[in-house]
Amino acid sequence: MPGYQPGKREGFPVLTVSEVLPEETRVVLQRLYAALEAEKERRREERRALGVLLRHRGFREVVCRFIDPGPRFAVGRKVLREAGVRLPRKLASRVIKRAEAIVLEEETGKRSFTKATNS
């Protein structure tokens, strides 16, 4: 016996996944894999959007200046659109809120807050 070679043992055939698993199981696994890949891509796009917002000086200025969330969201959406970030509206608003929280935490030094304060 020259050495161990996986799948090349005497008397045991080499089987592929498609030969071992039933068709229904393979289809379910393929769908789960596709959903996982889509989720990874969405998270990657969310991280990219957060980075774009945090680097944009205009967005930082608007967040620090206005208490009203209207201008913040408008500027945040505009910045994301200009950067070519493709996120659904709900996810974009979540990213904008997260970016606002980070900017305000950096500016005020406080972690828990609900609104910015005009100073």
Image (spheres, helix red, strand yellow):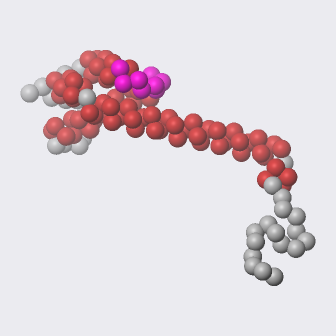
110 relative to 99, above or below: below
Looking at the figure, which quarter contains the C terminus? top left
Residue drawn at (59%, 42%), measured in percent from left and top?
36
Which of 25/82 is in front? 82
**Prevalent SS, magenta region:** loop
Residue drawn at (81%, 43%), measured in percent from left and top?
24
Percent x, y of residue 77:
35, 20
Residue drawn at (84%, 55%), measured in percent from left and top?
20
Q: Quadrant of residue 11?
A: bottom right
Which of 10/62 is in front? 10
**Residue lying farthest left?**
119
Where does the magenta region start and end? Answer: 82-89
Which of 101/21 is in front? 21
- Using residue 56 as the reference point, say whether residue 43 is left or right of it: right
Q: Quadrant of residue 63?
A: top left
Looking at the figure, which quarter contains the N terminus? bottom right
Percent x, y of residue 104:
21, 35
User: Is residue 9 highlighted in magenta?
Assistant: no
- Using residue 57 as the reference point, say whether residue 99 is left or right of it: right
- Using residue 104 as the reference point, say whether residue 91 is left or right of it: right
Percent x, y of residue 8:
82, 69
Residue drawn at (33%, 36%), measured in percent from left and top?
51
The answer to whether one can see residue 108 in this image is yes
Which of 78/71 is in front? 78
